Every structure is written in C-alpha cells, then in structure tokens.
Amino acid sequence: MKYLIKKDNQRRNIFKKFELKRLYLKYIIYNDSISKEVRTNAMILLNKLPKNSSNIRIHNRCVITGRPKAIYRDFRLSRMILRDYAHNGLLPGIIKSSW
C-alpha cells in the first residue's frame, strides 16, 4: 500500500507542475479564432506532456492506509480512519451527530 500512496503523491506533484501549461495549451486548441497551424502545434505539445500530468490519472486514496474506496475529500482519509480519528478527538471540530 505504501507504494500506491507514493505513486499517488508523485502523480499529484506532476499534475501540479504541468497544470497551467496544460490549461494554456487546451485553451489554444479549443479557441477557433486562433489559426489552425498554431492549434496543431499546441496539440503536438500537449501530446508530449507526461501522461501523469492529467488530473484524470489522480485517484483519491487514504493518506494513512492507501485505501482507494470511501474517501472523504476534505480530509483525504477513508471512512474507517476518519471515524477512529474523530472518536479519539484527533480531528478538531468533528463531533458525533445526534438528534
């Protein structure tokens, strides 16, 4: 599991590094007022970017266990770890709901 956590962190770092460049190139490609040659060159440059620079390749995983399912985005924790941390008071502001 540690390998998967490390791999996910690497993908997030690569995405952060190339995010603006990717957005800039996509803007050029989808803008009809720009000449066809420039748009084609932008398409070629976009294809040369690393695959992991796309946000589609990022998968939400628990940062503690590496579990890929039932992840709370705000905390990046799985439901089980979130529950344990909340019961132990390790997450400030999170309390058990009752009505």
Image (cartoon, helix red, strand yellow):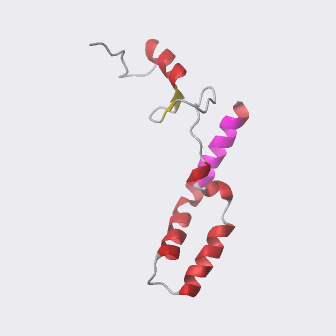
Tell me residue 43's x, y (percent).
61, 74
Tell me residue 4's x, y (percent).
69, 36
- Magenta stretch prevailing secondary structure: helix
Q: Residue at x 68, y 60 (%)?
A: 50
Q: Look at the picture and state if 62 lies above or below 29.
A: above
Looking at the image, residue 16 sits to the left or right of residue 33; the answer is: right
Q: Residue at x 64, y 42 (%)?
A: 8
Q: Quadrant of the N terminus?
A: top right
In the rendered picture of this protein, how many numbered marks are placed on residues? 0
Q: Quadrant of the C terminus?
A: top left
Q: Is residue 10 magenta?
A: yes
The stretch of residues the image draws in magenta is 4-15
Tell me residue 77's x, y (percent).
52, 28
Residue ranking furthest to the right = 3
Q: Residue at x 37, y 21 (%)?
A: 94
Q: Is residue 46 magenta?
A: no
Q: Look at the picture and state if 39 lies above or below 87.
A: below
Who is closer to the viewer here, 57 or 18? 57
Tell me residue 6's x, y (percent).
68, 38
Residue ranking furthest to the left = 99
Q: Residue at x 55, y 86 (%)?
A: 36
